[in-house]
Amino acid sequence: MTKSKKQLDLEFEEAYHKASKTDLRFPPDVRLHFYAYYKRATKDNSTHKEENLGSRLISAFKMNALFQTKGISKDQAKQKYIDLVNKYITD
């Protein structure tokens, strides 16, 4: 059964708040997945250069994570983000 846009948006917001409030620490690759899916879900679907990303190495990792999500829709990214939260944050 497909979720409605409103239901997906609500679940995404709940997942974002849950992820924002957790004290859990994740490995860098997991954090990059959270980053990339969140960016895809909330921004346009481009891989433009982000401002103020910090060091070049961190910037490169973030850009790589965004490239790996290239071509998925905002709704798909929202669902992937929700799935990540449900997988890693079970409290």
Image: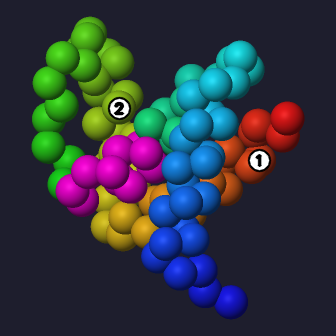
Q: Quadrant of residue 27?
A: top right
Q: Which residue is mark 2?
A: 62
Q: Which residue is mark 1?
A: 87
Give the image location of residue 34, x and y in percent. Answer: 52, 39
Q: Say left or right for 4 vs 74.
A: right
Q: Report the front residue among 55 and 89.
A: 89
Q: Quadrant of residue 39?
A: top left
Mark 2, other Cα within 10 Å: few <14 / some 14–19 / many ≥20: many
Is 22 located above or below residue 49 in the figure?
above
Helix, strand or loop status at disc 2: helix
Q: Residue at x 33, y 51 (%)?
A: 42
Give the image location of residue 84, x and y in percent. Answer: 66, 48
Q: Which residues are magenta?
A: 36-45
Which quadrant of the rendered structure holds the C terminus?
top right
Q: Is residue 11 visible?
A: yes
Which quadrant of the rendered structure holds the N terminus?
bottom right
Amino acid type of the residue tagged 1 in the rendering: Lys
Q: Residue at x 59, y 80 (%)?
A: 3
Give the image location of residue 25, x and y in percent. Answer: 69, 18
Asked whether residue 42 is drawn in magenta, I would say yes
Asked whether residue 67 is drawn in magenta, I would say no
Q: Is residue 81 visible?
A: no
Q: CA distance from mark 1 to mark 2?
A: 21 Å
Helix, strand or loop status at disc 1: helix
Q: Looking at this view, name the residue that lies furthest to the right.
A: 91
